[in-house]
Amino acid sequence: MDMQDAAERADGMLDSVLAKIEPSVQWVHGPTTSGTCTVTRRRTIMTVVSPQRRGSFLGVVDRFWRRSGYRMTAINNDAVFPAIYARTEDGFQVGLTVADKGQVHFTVDSPCVRHFEVADSTSPATASLDPGAELIPRPDIHSDFWSASGS
């Protein structure tokens, strides 16, 4: 496996977990980074996930990753900034972190693979960014379910 293969595998893992979130959320690509033999793909959720819905959101992802055979490596049950991390059988590390204003970030880090040029992801984002934006803004898309303050 080379770095492009690893990036494509990471994209597939991200596509799969995002497809399991119902109702669906809108997301953008985060930066792809690569080291000498690793690659990291990122996705940032632009749908506001309210504090009251974060546990449900993490539960959906946790159950999907476990059913997919991922081994949970760490769970942070912080009320404001929860996170979960897991590892696949082939050494990919996945993470979900909740940041400021309920913005959810997904990351997939590859194991060390053969060095190769890495192309941008071909997975179409479901939200858009201002073309002049240097940073991904805080979430600003309302969902009747995920952004709700009631239970």
Image: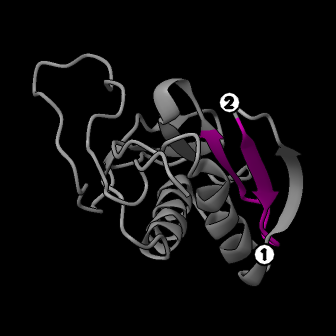
Q: Which residue is mark 1?
A: 66
Residue 143 visible in the picture: yes
SS label for mark 1? helix
Residue 95 painted magenta: yes
**Vertical placement of residue 151 versus 19, above or below:** above
SS label for mark 2? loop
Compare residues 86 and 78 and report the one nearer the observer: 78
Looking at numbered disc 2 in the image, what kind of residue is underneath it?
A: Val
Asked whether, in this view, residue 86 is left or right of residue 22, the answer is right
The residue stretch that appears in magenta = 82-97
As drawn, the residue found furthest toward the front would be: 150
Proximity of marks 2 and 1: CB atoms separated by less than 8 Å = no
Q: CA distance from mark 2 to mark 1?
A: 23 Å
Residue 148 painted magenta: no
Looking at numbered disc 1 in the image, what kind of residue is underneath it?
A: Arg
Q: Which residue is mark 2?
A: 80
